[in-house]
């Protein structure tokens, strides 16, 4: 067997089937996501707290951003303009 494959035994914990995760496969934290793909169970760790650490490493953005109210008003005004295809269809 490969180093990344281990034979484990399944057991019952109340009404649930369970398995012990060997130490070399342990996740940090106390939550994970479990989903089934065909006959495989996939367990994925839930990573928390890393976004703030990542953001702390980034340089500040010096760019000027557009005024959100002006952009929103332009989008709303544009969405009221019918397309040329619709105008031609209505004219016929």
Image (cartoon, grey):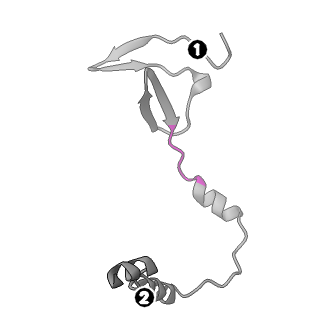
Q: Nearer the viewer, residue 11 or 44?
A: 44
Q: Is residue 78 left or right of residue 63?
A: left
Q: Position of residue 42 (x, y in %)?
A: 48, 29
- In which quadrant of the rendered view does residue 58 lie? bottom right
Residue drawn 46% across the image and 37% down it: 32
Q: Is residue 48 left or right of residue 90?
A: right
Q: Is residue 51 above or below residue 75?
A: above
- In which quadrant of the rendered view does residue 19 lie? top left
Q: Is residue 72 above or below residue 10?
A: below
Q: Nearer the viewer, residue 43 or 76?
A: 76
Q: Residue beneath label 2, please?
A: 77
Foreground disc of the pair 2, 1: 2
Q: What residue range appears in magenta?
A: 45-50
Residue drawn 73% across the image and 70% down it: 59
- In the picture as drawn, the residue positioned furthest to the front comes out as 92
Q: Position of residue 47 (x, y in %)?
A: 54, 45
Crowd tier of the residue under label 1, counting other residues whose Cα lies within 10 Å: few below 14, some 14–19, many 20 or above: few
Q: Is residue 10 above or below residue 36?
A: above
Crowd tier of the residue under label 2, counting other residues whose Cα lies within 10 Å: few below 14, some 14–19, many 20 or above: few
Residue drawn 40% across the image and 81% down it: 88
Mark 2 secondary-structure assignment: helix
Across the whole image, how many numbered discs are drawn on residues?
2
Q: Which mark is residue 6?
A: 1
């Amino acid at each position: 067997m490969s180093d990344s494959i281990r034979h484990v035994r399944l057991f019952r914990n109340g009404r649930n089937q369970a398995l012990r995760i060997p130490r070399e496969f342990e996740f940090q934290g106390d939550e994970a996501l479990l989903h089934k793909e065909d006959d495989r169970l996939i367990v994925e760790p839930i990573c928390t707290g890393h976004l703030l650490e990542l953001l702390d490493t980034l340089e500040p953005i010096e760019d000027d951003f557009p005024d959100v109210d002006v952009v929103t008003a332009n989008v709303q005004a544009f969405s009221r303009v019918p397309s040329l295809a619709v105008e031609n269809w209505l004219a016929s």
